[in-house]
């Protein structure tokens, strides 16, 4: 049941995205935004008029390297934006938000997964993202941080982005999956969350950047200002994204 | 642990300060050569750093709550220093093994509403937290593969038992359970999650 997308499949998907968006990124048009799949709902909520390509951040970064006509890239892992910045393909990335991971189980929890440690149980069907996509890499970090990497033996399917993981769990094709908290929230009552201890959480940091080749950098910058501005942050926080706590007041007497 | 990393650890302890930290450093250094740390050992270290973070926050809020003065307040200051030293020692053990640190900035915590409003309530919470740390670290001692890390947990367990006894003594006789519970990582993590939303 293990599924891997073939390179031809990925190429076809990339070409389809390119064809779909080609020639659309002209000045005065709404910006074309390539964004991590986990941003699907909240970005559409913040700016319904933008054109979006949602996928795994690794796929989107590759497409930008290949010249896809994007104005903005929002990645679920800073390494992709930073590498593109280093190579002169995007402008200096800006912090967008933090996120956390959670285990998700289908409604009714048929396999009785009550703890993340239950993922090690023999016979549990687990779905995760592949290691190249940020959520897949973070999942492996979580398992390692918890000392439960052996749970990877229970993986029955590796997906290309977090929304595919969510879909498999919602459909009951797996007993459990690992997704972002924000995706689990977006799925509502279709899934149940099983918390991952905070000490095992990786630092899931999203970054956003203007693509250097963008024909309309003003529109791109305006989009980024929208999603990082007060309304954008409020909507992202409502969706479960996290932001650094406000600066602490000066310490008073009696504390150290 | 090789000599270079031990030196690095000592430098950090010196920078971090405190006699308790130095004591912890000596204990950490005195262990036999490390290198056998398992994934589970590292998970225990991450847990311990987070647990000490909760504990340090508890002592700080307790001192600020105004229910204690004089020698009790001074003892609470020493307890805070001990918890900071534990956290430093666990963090150093983790980073010396080439693992990324857990920063306080990555952690948020919450205590039950009104937990510090009265002296008995404050002490009840403290005993719960210290008990959690003690039971967890005893669990760590029984499962950790690396001898140096196990030794560190054993030392800190003794220190936590001291502090649990101190808090118990502030509320009544300081004699506790003759056989404290031993928690596995799963149970300990679940108990700690109450303070970490």
Image (spheres, rainbow, N blue to C red):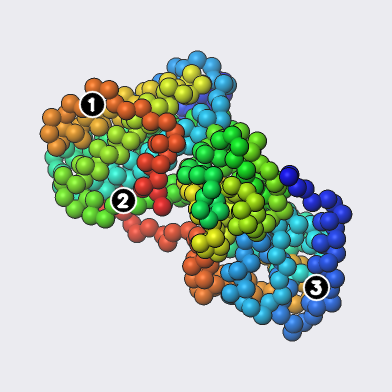
Which residue is identified by label 1?
Answer: B177
Contact, mark 1 vs mark 2 (Cβ under 8 Å): no
Q: Would residue A48 be seen by someone viewing this image from the given angle?
A: yes
In three-dimensional space, the C-alpha distance between marks 1 and 2, rounded to whole angstroms, equals 25 Å
Looking at the image, the residue that sits furthest to the bottom is A28
> Vertical placement of B114 versus A22: above or below?
above
* Chain of residue at mark 2: B
Marking on residue B164? none
* Chain of residue at mark 1: B
Describe residue A110's horizontal placement relative to residue B180 as left or right.
Answer: right
> Vertical placement of A169 versus A73: above or below?
above
Which residue is identified by label 2?
Answer: B111
Q: Position of residue A67 (x, y in %)?
A: 84, 64
Q: Position of residue B105 (x, y in %)?
A: 46, 50
Front in this rendered view, residue B59 or B183: B183
Describe residue A252's horizontal placement relative to residue A150 as left or right.
Answer: left
Helix, strand or loop at label 1? It is loop
Which residue is found at the position 65% from the left and 54% from the top?
A: A168
Which residue is identified by label 3?
Answer: A21
Foreground: disc 3 or disc 1: 1
Q: Would residue A77 be seen by someone viewing this image from the given angle?
A: no
Helix, strand or loop at label 3? It is helix
> Mark 1 or mark 2: which comes first in sequence?
2
């Amino acid at each position: 049941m293990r599924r891997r997308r073939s390179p031809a499949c990925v190429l076809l998907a990339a070409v389809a995205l390119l064809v779909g968006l080609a020639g659309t990124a002209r000045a005065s048009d709404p910006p074309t935004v390539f964004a991590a799949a986990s941003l699907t709902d909240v970005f559409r909520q913040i700016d319904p008029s933008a054109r979006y390509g949602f996928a795994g951040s690794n796929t989107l970064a590759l497409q930008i390297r290949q010249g896809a006509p994007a104005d903005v890239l929002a990645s679920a892992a800073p390494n992709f934006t930073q590498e593109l910045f280093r190579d002169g393909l995007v402008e200096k990335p800006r912090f967008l938000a933090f996120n956390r991971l959670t285990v998700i189980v289908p409604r009714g929890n048929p396999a009785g997964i009550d703890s993340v440690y239950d993922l090690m149980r023999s016979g549990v069907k687990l779905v995760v993202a592949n290691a190249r996509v940020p959520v897949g890499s973070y999942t492996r970090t979580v398992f390692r941080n918890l000392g439960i990497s052996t749970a990877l033996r229970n993986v029955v399917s590796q997906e290309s982005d977090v929304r595919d993981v969510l879909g498999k769990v919602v459909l009951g094709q797996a007993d459990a999956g690992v997704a972002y908290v924000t995706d689990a929230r977006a799925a509502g009552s279709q899934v149940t969350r099983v918390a991952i201890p905070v000490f095992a959480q990786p630092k899931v940091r999203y970054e956003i950047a203007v693509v250097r080749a963008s024909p309309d950098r003003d529109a791109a910058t305006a989009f980024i200002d929208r999603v990082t501005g007060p309304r954008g942050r409020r909507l992202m926080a409502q969706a479960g994204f996290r932001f650094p706590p406000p600066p602490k007041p000066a310490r008073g007497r009696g504390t150290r | 642990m090789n000599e270079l990393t031990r030196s690095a650890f000592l430098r950090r302890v010196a920078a971090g300060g405190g006699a308790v930290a130095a004591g912890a450093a000596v204990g950490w250094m005195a262990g036999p050569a490390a290198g056998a740390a398992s994934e589970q050992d590292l998970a225990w270290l991450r847990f311990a750093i987070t647990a000490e973070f909760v504990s340090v926050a508890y002592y700080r809020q307790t001192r600020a709550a105004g229910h204690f003065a004089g020698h009790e307040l001074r003892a609470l200051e020493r307890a805070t220093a001990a918890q900071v030293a534990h956290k430093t020692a666990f963090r150093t053990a983790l980073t010396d093994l080439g693992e990324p640190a857990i920063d306080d900035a990555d952690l948020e915590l919450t205590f039950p509403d009104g937990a510090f409003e009265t002296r008995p309530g404050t002490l009840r919470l403290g005993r719960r937290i210290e008990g959690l740390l003690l039971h967890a670290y005893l669990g760590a001692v029984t499962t950790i593969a690396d001898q140096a890390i196990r030794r560190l947990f054993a030392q800190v367990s003794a220190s936590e038992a001291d502090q649990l006894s101190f808090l118990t003594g502030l509320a009544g006789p300081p004699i506790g359970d003759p056989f404290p519970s031993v928690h596995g990582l799963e149970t300990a993590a679940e108990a700690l999650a109450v303070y970490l939303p």
